[in-house]
Image (tube, helix red, strand yellow):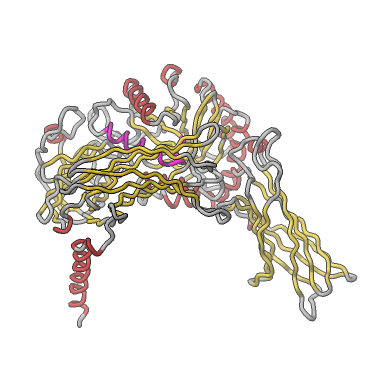
Amino acid sequence: MTAGRALPRARFLLGLLWAVACAAPGEAPLDATHALELRSGWDYAPAEKEVAQASGLWFTGGTPVPPRLPAGWQPVRLPHRPEAEPCGFYRATFAVPAAWAGSRVSLVARAPGVTAWVWLNGQLLGVRYPSALDVRLDATKALRVGARNTLLIGVAQPSSPGDGLAACRLEATAAVGVARLAANPWCLAGGAVVDVALDVANGGRERFEGRLELALEAEADGKQPARVWRRASDVRLDAGQALTLAQSFEPDPPRLWRPDDPFLYRLTATVQTREGQAVRTVPCRIGLRSAAASQGRWLANGEWVRLAGIAATVRGATLLCTQPGQAIPLSMKAAAGKEPPLDELLAFCDEEGILAVLDAPACAPDTPGWAETIAALAAEALRHPCVCGWLVRGEGRGTRGEGGGAREESEDPESEIRNPKSEISTLARLRELTPRLPIGRPLPCTAAEAKDFDFLLSRFATRPGREDDDAYGRRLDDLVRDAGGKAVIAIDRVAETDDVGRTDGSLAHRLREVERRSQVAALAFELDADETLLAAAEKRLSPFRLNPPSHEARLDRETFVLKTRFEAHLASPVAQRLPCYSLAGCRIAWTASRGDALVAAGAVPLTNAQPRAIEGGCQPGRGEVEWRIVGGASAPREEAIEFAAELHIPSGRVLARHASRMSLRTKDGRAEVSVEPLDKREVP
C-alpha cells in the first residue's frame, strides 16, 4: 500500500474508533466522560459597537435578545486571536453521536478576558463576565442528539487586544450525576471542619433511586495507613429533578495545609445505583487552612506570616512563591502563551505551597454574567488552600475605555478605572460568599477608600542599582503610611536584570529594608529573567542556610572512616521568629563520589528541640552520620572525594545545597582530611 493511500485510511480508522467509543457506552464505565473537541469548522465575524448593542452584547443591562449577526464571516481555527475590534461572533455547526441520548452534556469554552454570550440552537445557555476560568454551561436541553447543532458565541469588550476564543468542547456524562460539588474547609481553635454542598441532578427520562457516598481521605504518609471519613445519603430523583445535599466532616486529628507542608485531602462524591454500581464519581483535593489580615499582620492558621520571594502575575491572580525551588517550575507552568486555566494553576499552587491572591472584578451587580463569574471564582477560592485572599480590581491595563474601545497599555502598574460604588457592592458579595478570606484593594487609595478592606497591595517598577536602592526605604515607608495600619503586600517589578551581580546586590539591600518594617506582610519580586537569575534570586531571598559540613577521619585497617556533622538554620533573625519558616521534618540528603562512581550516600534527619518559631525563635537543626571508604587489599594513601549535601523539606523540595571537594590521605598511620568548598556549584 502506498503512503498516499495509507494516510486517508488511517484517518478513517481513527474516526471509526472514536465513533465506536462514543456509540458504545455500555462497554465503558457508567461514570465515564466522553468529550467532543470543537477545534475546526469555526467561522468568525467582527462586530461594530452598534451591531453589538443591537445584539445585547454591550453592557447595557436587561434581558439579552437573539443576536443580529454581522456580515463578513471568515473561517478560523481555535485558538483564535481577533484584531482590535471590541466585539465579535464565533459560529460552528456540529453533530453528536446518537449514543449521547439521555446523557448530561456540558459545554466548556475557554474565552479568557472577554464577556462570553453562548447560544446553542438559538437558546441562550448563559453569559459569563471576563475571568481566567473556563466557561462551563449546561447544554443538555438545547442539544439535538443525532442531528446538526449550531453553536454561536459572542465575545465582547476584551481585557486586552487579542483576547478571543481559545478552545471549546462538549462533555457527555451519565444522565444522573453531581452537577456541583463545593467544599468549604475552615479551621477552629481545636480542630477543623469541612462543609460540603452538592447538587445531584437527574437529566434522564426515568426515576432514579440510589445512594450518594461522600469520602474524605487523608493520604498515607508512609508511616500510617490512609484515613477515610465517610458520609452517605439515599437519593430519589424523578426525571428532570435536582436535589441539593449538605454534609460536614471533622477530621481528627486535622493536618493543616501550610506553605512548607502543603498537605491535601482527597474528597470524592459517588452516585451509586441500588446495586452499588457507580453512576458518577467526582473527585477533588482540598486543604485545611485559615487566612486572615488583622492589625497590620497577615495570619495563616492563626500564625504571623511574612514572606520575601518571587512573584508571578497571571490572568486572574497574583502568585507568591514561599519556598526555594518554586520559582522555576512556576515560571514554566505560567509561561506566556501556555498559561493554563486558573483552576488548573491553583491546583499546581496547592501542591507546591505557593500562595495566590485572586482578582475580583469590581462591577455593578446587574452587569451581565458578573454574578455567575463571582460565584464560580468564590467556589474555586474556597476549594483551593493556596488562595489567601482577594484583590478587588477595577478595569485594568488594556481594558475598555470610556468610549468602549480598548485602552492602550499604560506604564502605570496601577492604572485602573475605579468605581467606588462597584467596589463596595463587590466587597459585600465577597464577604457573603467567602466570609473567612481577607479582601484587599490596590494602592494608591485614600483612607476612606481603604477603610472597609483588610489589606492593601502595591505594584511598582524599579531597576537594580544604587539610585532605586537608596530610595527603597522611603518607598516602603510611604506604603506603610498610606496603608493606615493595614497589612501591605508589595510587588516589585524589577526591570533590566541582565547584570546578575548588580541584581543580586539590589535584592539583598531591599530584603534588609523590608525586614525592618513589620507591616509589610510580603515583598515579592517579578523578574523578567531566565532560570539562572531566578535560581540566584531564590538563593538570595531564601532564609534557609546549610552550613558547610564538618568532617573527622580515622583509619580502620585499610578503610577510611568518616564522621560528618551537619547544621542547618534560618539566617534571618526575622525568619527565625516566624512560624511560616520551619525546619520541622527537614533532613539532609548527602552523596560522596569518586569521579562518576558513587562511594556512599544517605539521608540524615535533623534533630531540633524547637524546629518552628515559638518564644525565642527557631533553633538550628543538627545531624551526623558515619560512613566508610573501603580501599581493598592495597588501600590508596590518598583519595579525592566530591561531597554534596542538600537540605530537604518532608515533601522532598530542596531548600539549600552545599558542595565541596575532600582530600583524604594517610600520614604516619593516621588519616587526615582537608575540604575545599565549591561555591560556584552551590544552587539555591
Residue nearest the observer in this picture, 655 or 351: 351
Q: Position of residue 119 (x, y in %)?
A: 15, 42
Residue drawn at (49%, 52%) of the image: 219
In the foreground, 144 or 642: 144
Instruction: Identify the residue at horizontal 47%, vertical 43% (top origin).
Output: 287
In the image, is residue 281 above or below residue 558? Answer: above
Residue 17 located left or right of residue 214: left
Residue 386 picture location, percent across and down: 46, 41
359 in relation to 663, above or below: above
- 601 and 584: which is toward the camera: 584
Residues in magenta, as a range: 370-388
Q: Quadrant of the N terminus?
A: bottom left
> Residue pushed farthest top?
448
Up the image or down, 63 lies above or below 541; here it is above
x 59%, y 43%: residue = 541
Is residue 385 part of the magenta span, yes or no? yes
**Drawn side of residue 301 relative to residue 546, left or right:** left
Q: Position of residue 344 (x, y in %)?
A: 38, 48
Please identify the quarter of the rendering in which residue 451 is found: top left
Q: Is residue 494 above or below residue 642?
A: above
Q: Looking at the magenta stretch, what is its main secondary structure?
A: helix
Can residue 116 be found in the magenta stretch?
no
Residue 381 seen by the camera: no
Percent position (x, y) of residue 449? 41, 19
Tell me what residue is drawn at x 66 percent, y 43 percent. 611
Toward the right, the furthest residue is 668
Farthest residue, direction bottom: 1
Q: Is residue 232 visible?
A: yes
Question: Camera-side residue: 499 or 349?
Answer: 349
